[in-house]
Amino acid sequence: MLAVIDYGAGNLRSVLHALKHLGVRDMRLVRRPDELAGAKKIILPGVGAFGACMAQMRKQDLVAPLSEALAAGIPYLGICVGMQMLYEIGEEMGEHEGLGILGGRVVRFPHFTNRKVPHMGWNQLNIRRGSALLHGLGAANYVYFVHSYYCAPSEADTVVASVDYGVEFAAFVQQDNIYGVQFHPEKSQQVGLRILANFLRV
């Protein structure tokens, strides 16, 4: 069973549409901790502010069971804020504690004179190392971003791919069974669908 966490702020419609397009049938929307039981894979979509999203996860008592599932080796894919919440601290609207599963912080893009924030649009991934989620993809992979904050991991070896947007930031990370993408695979056309399909095969 694929568990898709619904904490009231995720981009659920597009994600669910993409998963159904890929033929997923055994899928459950998770709003309570007991609904994570039996999950073989977990996806946490994310749209919104880091602090507000973490507050809602705590309100729904999802933090502890999610952390336990990840520690037990269940494959996890965090999308956008779902990736950001893996880290220790998020700086959006003040400092807020994240899940603390990965070391690092979530910080705001600096003030640019020649670039807009939020970072919105298509960028090419700079692949740094291999990952099962990249299977079948070529060298030029463009994906879609919408964000003002980015992850600054403590462990550089967790970064699978980065993007240069005035600063080089982690666009795709992996640590064992835990995957995080700052971009939106559900909005990234064939490249995004391939990444989601590869996650389903992990």
Image: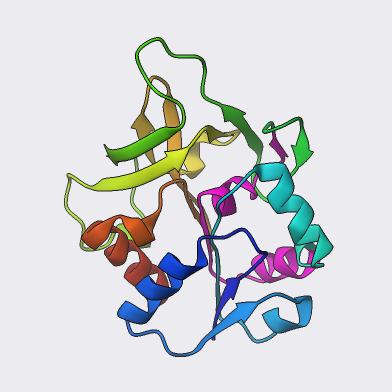
Residue under the image location 44 percent in, 14 percent down:
112
Q: Is residue 26 left or right of residue 124?
A: right
From the image, which quarter does the C terminus lie in? bottom left
Q: Percent x, y for residue 82? A: 58, 54
Above or below: residue 83 compared with residue 19: above
Relative to 34, is 113 on the left or the right? left
Instruction: Please tell me which residue is depicted at 45% across the width and 26% down the height of the picture.
Output: 117
Q: Is residue 100 visible?
A: no
**Quadrant of the rendered structure where residue 61 is?**
bottom right
Locate residue 68, reporting x and y percent: 74, 68
Q: Is residue 159 above or below residue 164?
A: below
Write the residue at 64% across / 46% down: 102
Q: Nearer the viewer, residue 103 or 86?
A: 86
Q: Residue at x 41, y 66 (%)?
A: 14
Give yes or no for residue 76 being in the magenta stretch.
Answer: yes
Give the residue furthest to the bottom: 26
Residue 154 or 118: which is nearer the viewer? 118
Check the image and tell me how it is coloured: rainbow
Magenta region: which residues?
Answer: 64-90
Q: Which residue is at the front of the view, 138 or 109? A: 109
Quarter of image, res 145: top left
Q: Is residue 43 left or right of residue 136?
A: right
Quarter of the figure with the N terminus: bottom right
